[in-house]
Image (cartoon, rainbow, N blue to C red):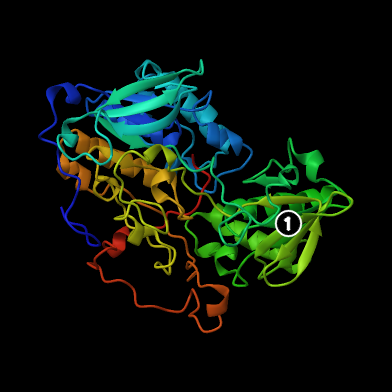
Amino acid sequence: MSSCCGGASRAEPRAEASAGTSRLPVAVIGGGPVGLAAAAHLLARGLEPVILEAGPSVGTAPLDWGHVPMFSPWRYNLDRAAGALLERHGWTAPEAEEFPTGRDLVERYLKPLAALPDIATRLRLNTRVTGIARLGAGKLRNAGREQQPFELRFIGADGRARRLLASAVIVASGTWGSPSPAGASGLPAIGEREAADRIRYGMPDILGTDHGRYGGRRTLVVGSGHSAIGTLLDLGRLARQVPGTAVLWATRSADLTRAYGGGSADQLPERGALGQRLRHLVESGAIELLAPFSVDEIRRTEGGALTVQSAEGPAVEADELVVATGLRPDLGILREVRTDLDPALECPRMLAPLIDPNLHSCGTVRPHGAEELAQPDTGLFLAGMASYGRAPTFLLATGYEQVRSIAAFLAGDVAAARRVELDLPQTGVCSSDRLLPAATETGSSCCTPKPAPAADAPCCGSQARLGVAQVEPAE
């Protein structure tokens, strides 16, 4: 199968695999929603998975943002194979149109799934993978490479280094543990590391456990994605409850179209409502907007607060800084295997044209699977948020479709691997052209009308299949 955006496919069944290798398990790195879904699909195909999770529990990332309500209802957050496995053991699915929090996702879905004998006997917690290679074949070696199993090195709960041999590897480790820094260039701002005690990354529990840290203080939030928006909304609510609480919002672009979202045009109403609530807080003065504001340097004042200097010139003081500038994959474990990643997004190269925010004006991402996610070392796949690299858009349903396709491919069912079994909601808002500040004056608007893709347009799929994989804290 050839890609519309690449050369010949790398995802072809491995006829040359030795009988010994084929009897080895498929290693799934990550015990989040997509990793557990991968295990369920592999089991449904008669394959043997082993799940390696670095944390003490499944779903450690959703637990970290457990206070956050998801903007997609349960029906988009449950995998079919995992749900079928649960139902065979008497589990009742949550109401399809209810909106879970991250904690709900874990307590009502992931933990019951992990407790099933089918999964529990194949799940290794507190197991941090430190590297992947071909057994006895360094990265430079070609001869006999494909016949060698994968060797995974990991640190177990006892702190000792061990190894695991696998016939294939699905990397579903997510990106939640690798936040991007505040610095606009992609590097930490000057002074960012030294100010670490006043900085939180991601989505602190503003109205819960972190209430005392932000109440009555001046907080600057950096970023314009849904993590930033959710934090700003919580801070706005806190400001109404606790006198002296001030909220500032720094965003690198003065174009807030994406941040304010699609409103009623969004097929996920909770997602569409977020941006409209934020717009109201900004326009009412409850949140002070700084735009464009590209963080360049962070300095401490004599009183211990922070002075945040922008590349544009203005500076602002804040007691606390929340950085929600996106996530990036930790690629260290892939150093000794052969990968083909997009140089900008750090995602599989064949997937990049489908998800690159520089290319897609209206957030359309066609479903994709094993072919787009396969790496040059046959049997190695990236899935879930790890497969999206630095791209800011992802929905759990996308990850579930990815691992369904990968499991089908590994089982030799290429027709099923190529089949599309995904229906995604529309966003109702265009994506930014992501131009550098100097180019925005002459660049086109993100919502400048553009011709709709033809039904058979290459790289986009049929119009009926066009959907959005919108950002969601997911793994």
Determine the residue positioned at 18% across, 36% down: 146
Q: For the residue labelled by badge 1, is the local secondary structure a helix, a strand or a loop?
A: strand
Classify residue 177 as left or right of residue 39. Answer: right
Asked if residue 81 shows in the view, the reply is no
Q: Which residue is mark 1?
A: 298
- The quadrant where residue 455 appears: bottom left
- The quadrant where residue 248 appears: bottom right
Residue 41 on image: x %, y %: 29, 32
Vertical arrangement, residue 211 with respect to residue 56, above or below: below
Vertical arrangement, residue 286 with respect to residue 372, above or below: below
Classify residue 15 as left or right of residue 259. Answer: left
- Pick out the residue farthest to the left: 15
Determine the residue positioned at 82% across, 45% down: 215
Asked if residue 34 shows in the view, the reply is yes
Amino acid carrying label 1: it is Ile
Determine the residue positioned at 25% across, 41% down: 140
Residue 399 on image: x %, y %: 38, 43
Classify residue 234 as left or right of residue 358. Answer: right
Vertical arrangement, residue 288 with respect to residue 54, above or below: below
Q: Who is closer to the viewer here, 21 or 86?
A: 21
